[in-house]
Image: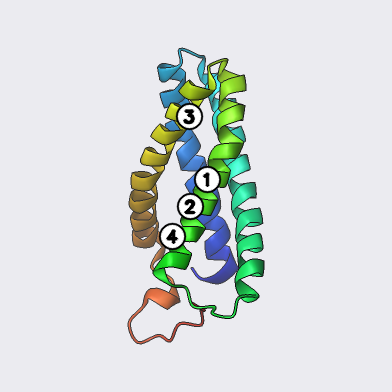
Amino acid sequence: MQGAKRKVTQAVLYELVAVLFVAPAMAFAFDKGLAHSGALALLLSLLALSWNMLFNSLFEYWEARQKERARTFGRRLLHALGFEGGLTLLLVPVMAWWLEISWWQALVADIGLLAFFFFYAFAFQWAFDLVFGVPESARDGVPCACSG
């Protein structure tokens, strides 16, 4: 599977499986019902997807106007910090309000989610590649049509 179909399938499955992991964990950690935590997990997932699309569009808009366009380590670090920082600014107030907890508790929960997603993203993508095959850009002998 390649192209847009692969990207959409990957994004939808990634978020669906994440919600199935995160909802019970939040229900347990915050002593809330599964439906309450599941709705929050779904909301956080939709916010993360929306932020991803908006942030990447803005970042690429900015990047295209730079004199040096190479994806250096520094630029990748800036991208990661900007994305995660913005996501934290979005998710912490929502979690505090939804779970009726302090902003500090919501920040700690967000850091826990960040740690989970670091390992989850690695494992999910590996499993996804095993099931659906790797993209053409990752195959030996196939020229990459991607930039950066």
Look at mark 3 in the image and give the residue it sits on: 107
Q: Residue furthest front?
A: 67
Q: Establish if 81 lies above or below 129.
A: above
Task: Judge the density around disc 3: few (<14), some (14-19), many (≥20) Cα neighbours within 10 Å.
Answer: some
Disc nearer the start of the sequence (3/1): 1
Task: Judge the density around disc 2: few (<14), some (14-19), many (≥20) Cα neighbours within 10 Å.
Answer: few
Residue 77, label in figure:
4
Q: Amino acid at mark 4?
A: Leu
Mark 4 and mark 3 in contact? Answer it, CB < 8 Å. no
Q: Position of residue 124 (x, y in %)?
A: 38, 50
Mark 2 and mark 1 in contact? Answer it, CB < 8 Å. yes
Disc nearer the start of the sequence (2/3): 2
Q: Secondary structure at mark 4?
A: helix
Residue in the foreground of this view, choosing between 98 and 128:
98
Residue 81, label in figure:
2
Disc nearer the start of the sequence (4/3): 4
